[in-house]
Image (tube, rainbow, N blue to C red):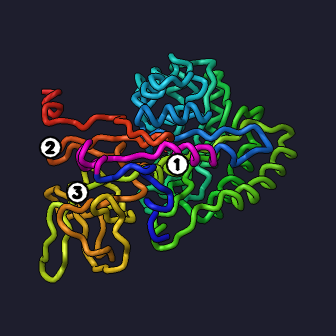
């Protein structure tokens, strides 16, 4: 793909330079239509049986994006009381929220129980805590299906090396606890990790979870977790995750289970990244270009406080260069290292990247920043967090979160 920005008409006819001038940089820019389309895609992964795609909100908790999920009919997963509150504020009814915390305090667990929000317990001791808080109650348990997958060790959340889930061999202990507190296990869930493009490990984990599900009676739901990937190397030709072929391979696995189980519970998945990653970019301003020991550095205002993924996970984000409001074609290129403005040598967005020759004053447009971008941002180096705007379906640009100010940093003193 030569340019994602042009091919998808990301700014819907608006001039990105004008947007950057009006709202300042660094700036998160979202495209409403792309996000809606992705949410709609995952909502159709299973059509033969009852199914919901639960948007995993930690990928992006901007309330205006939560409202898109609400309108698209997605349910949501929350990991904390903060995420639950945000969902309630966005207008989600409690029935459409699934709480999947780990290592929460009694208070944080009680918060959801009192609201009547379905909660999944991630360990035997948290299940025991739930029993004490809510004897006779209904809950779910998170199972570790023994297979993990993901783009980095830090995001693999099942298998042998992870803090998450209850191991299969501990299932008899689950039943002891449920008996002791007269609990009903309404559902089981798993999440094997984040960002896979090869569906094989996920399908294998689905099969494992369904095999495990046979040991639970009258399940109301079975939740296979999230992790569907998006092509972060799209400018190098990487293709979209093939939902259609995934769907075709998933269905016979479900058929076989439904036949053996005797009924179809509600199936769920928990996509986060897939819903929002491609629908968000960051516009950053190039403030310096310099040569250091034979290496060329492009210094922008997109620091690791704005986007931490490259420094945290060595993640790749494609970059397009915008000059005078237009994408610069990738013809006259050179190898540069693109950095931010934070005092850390790990503050790098892209290492030795082949980009069109960049000049001071250009905009660097960081692609695929809608997931785990703003939601992981910080005010490190006392740099206020950026603003977020949405390019709406009708082409208008709407401020959906104002830029933090230095005064905001004084708020908690
Ligand atoms: C983060 C998370 C997800 C979403 O993962 P993605 O890779 O963004 O799809 C789903 N379920 C659980 C339990 C998670 O922690």
In the shown orientation, is residue 294 left or right of residue 55? left
> What is the secondary structure assignment of the residue under circle 1?
helix
Q: Residues within 10 Å of mark 2 (few under 14, many from 20)?
A: few
Which residue in the protein does label 3 denote? 285
- Indicate whether residue 39 is drawn in magenta: yes
Callouts 3 and 2 close, C-beta under 8 Å = no
Visible in this render: residue 267? yes
SS label for mark 3: strand
Q: Which residue is mark 1?
A: 34
| Residue at the disc numbered 2 | 382
The answer for how far apart the CA atoms under marks 3 and 1 are is 24 Å
| Quarter where residue 284 is shown | bottom left
Q: Nearer the viewer, residue 349 or 223?
A: 349
Residue at image x 52%, y 70%? 238
Neighbor class of circle 3 (other Cα within 10 Å; few <14, some 14-19, many 20+) is many
- Mark 1 touching mark 2, by CB under 8 A? no
Q: Quadrant of the C terminus?
A: top left
Q: Which residues are magenta?
A: 18-42
Q: Is residue 352 magenta?
A: no
Q: Could you say where residue 273 lies in the image, as x and y percent from the top left?
A: 49, 50
Label drawn at residue 409: none
């Amino acid at each position: 793909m030569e340019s994602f920005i042009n091919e998808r008409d990301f700014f819907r006819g608006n001039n990105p330079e004008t947007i950057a001038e009006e709202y300042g940089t660094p700036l998160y820019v979202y495209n409403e239509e792309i996000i809606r389309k992705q949410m709609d895609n995952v909502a159709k992964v299973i059509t033969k049986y009852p199914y919901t795609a639960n948007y995993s909100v930690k990928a992006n908790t901007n309330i205006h994006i939560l409202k898109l999920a609400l309108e698209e009919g997605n349910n949501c997963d929350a990991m904390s009381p903060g995420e639950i509150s945000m969902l309630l504020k966005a207008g989600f009814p409690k029935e459409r929220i699934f709480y999947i915390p780990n290592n929460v305090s009694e208070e944080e667990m009680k918060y959801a129980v009192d609201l009547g929000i379905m909660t999944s317990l991630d360990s035997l001791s948290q299940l025991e805590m739930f029993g004490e808080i809510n004897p006779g109650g209904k809950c779910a348990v998170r199972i570790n299906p023994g297979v993990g997958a993901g783009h980095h060790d830090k995001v693999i959340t099942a298998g042998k090396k992870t803090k998450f889930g209850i191991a299969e061999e501990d299932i008899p202990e689950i039943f002891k606890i449920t008996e002791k507190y007269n609990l009903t296990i309404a559902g089981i869930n798993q999440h094997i990790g984040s960002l896979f493009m090869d569906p094989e490990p996920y399908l294998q984990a689905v099969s494992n979870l369904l095999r495990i599900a046979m040991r639970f009676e009258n399940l109301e739901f079975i939740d296979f977790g999230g992790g569907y990937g998006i092509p972060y190397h799209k400018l190098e030709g990487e293709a979209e995750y093939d939902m259609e072929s995934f769907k075709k391979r998933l269905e016979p696995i479900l058929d076989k289970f439904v036949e053996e189980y005797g009924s179809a519970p509600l199936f769920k998945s928990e996509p986060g990244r897939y819903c929002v990653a491609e629908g968000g970019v960051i516009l950053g301003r190039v403030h310096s270009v310099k040569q250091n020991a034979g290496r060329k550095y492009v210094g922008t205002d997109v620091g690791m406080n704005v986007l931490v993924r490259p420094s945290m996970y060595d993640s790749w984000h494609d970059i397009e260069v915008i000059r005078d409001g237009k994408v610069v074609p990738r013809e006259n290129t050179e190898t540069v290292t693109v950095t931010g403005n934070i005092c850390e040598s790990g503050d790098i967005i892209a290492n030795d990247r082949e980009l069109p020759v960049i000049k001071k004053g250009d905009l660097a447009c960081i692609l695929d920043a809608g997931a785990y971008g703003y939601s992981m941002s910080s005010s490190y180096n006392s740099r206020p967090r950026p603003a977020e705007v949405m390019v709406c379906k009708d082409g208008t640009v709407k401020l959906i979160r104002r830029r933090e100010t230095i005064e905001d940093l004084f708020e908690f003193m």
